[in-house]
Image: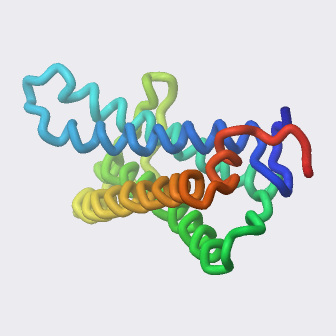
């Protein structure tokens, strides 16, 4: 089983990182959506935001690793049956997904550290504020975080719908390439 990507498909590392990131994004979105309505006396009032922030910091590290991995191993070639507009649209969507993930993660971090405090990652280590105390930053970052996460989830759903369309209607290898690691370069 191939660890790195080849011209014909994704390797095990890219596949694992893709699916961890996808589940983390949707899980964080669901947790964030749920936790904003918690009352002060709810058991999860403090635990949910701490979990959300911790996963966010770890996801940021994973996404930085993912960018380096993609840079050094490249991506598979487009599938020959794809039309030019499909290939261009897919590249644009992937690029925008990366941008939205990083905007959501950075803005979430800025919400939590706008008062100069650090973020504890499951009690394992602390990530210090990079801005110190900045008045009004929490509100601005909050708006950016809110809209970027909604845009991210909508685009990710469109991305998934496109993969399913390629699998069920076009019957090509698009979805299978991100599900099954390549064994060798064809």
Q: Residue furthest bottom?
A: 85
Q: Is residue 66 above or below residue 96?
A: above
Residue 180 shown left or right of residue 38 in the figure: right
Give the image location of residue 170, x and y in percent. 60, 60
Query: Going 30% across and 40% down the picture, which residue do you hit?
Result: 30
- Between 120 and 176, the residue placed more toward the observer is 176
Quick check: 123 above or below 146? above
Quarter containing the N terminus: top right
Q: Is residue 54 left or right of residue 33?
A: right
Q: Residue furthest top?
A: 43
Residue 111 image offset from top left, x and y in percent: 31, 52
Q: Position of residue 18 (x, y in %)?
A: 60, 44
Q: Establish if 33 lies above or below 138.
A: above
Q: Nearer the viewer, residue 174 or 14?
A: 174
Display coloring: rainbow
For residue 114, say whether it is visible: yes
The answer to whether residue 131 of the structure is visible from this angle is no
Residue 35 vs residue 178: left or right?
Answer: left
Q: Residue at x 63, y 40 (%)?
A: 17
Query: Residue drawn 63% across and 55% down?
Result: 171
Q: Is residue 128 above or below residue 147?
A: above
Tally of numbered tags:
0
Examine the image and state in which quarter residue 166 appears: bottom right
Picture residue at 23% right of the left edge, 44% below the top: 33
């Amino acid at each position: 089983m191939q660890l790195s990507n080849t011209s014909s498909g994704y390797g095990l590392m890219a596949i694992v990182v893709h699916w961890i990131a996808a589940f983390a994004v949707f899980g964080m979105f669901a947790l964030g959506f749920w936790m904003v309505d918690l009352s002060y006396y709810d058991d999860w009032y403090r635990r949910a935001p701490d979990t959300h922030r911790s996963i966010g910091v770890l996801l940021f590290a994973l996404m930085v690793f993912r960018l380096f991995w993609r840079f050094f191993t490249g991506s598979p070639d487009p599938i020959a049956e794809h039309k030019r507009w499909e290939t261009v649209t897919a590249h644009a969507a992937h690029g925008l997904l990366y941008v939205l993930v990083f905007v959501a993660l950075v803005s979430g971090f800025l919400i939590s550290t706008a008062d100069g405090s650090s973020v504890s990652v499951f009690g394992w280590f602390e990530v210090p504020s990079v801005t110190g105390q900045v008045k009004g930053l929490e509100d601005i970052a909050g708006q950016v975080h809110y809209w970027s996460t909604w845009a991210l989830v909508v685009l990710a759903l469109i991305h998934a719908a496109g993969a399913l369309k390629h699998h069920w209607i076009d019957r090509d290898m698009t979805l299978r390439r991100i599900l099954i690691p390549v064994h060798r370069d064809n």
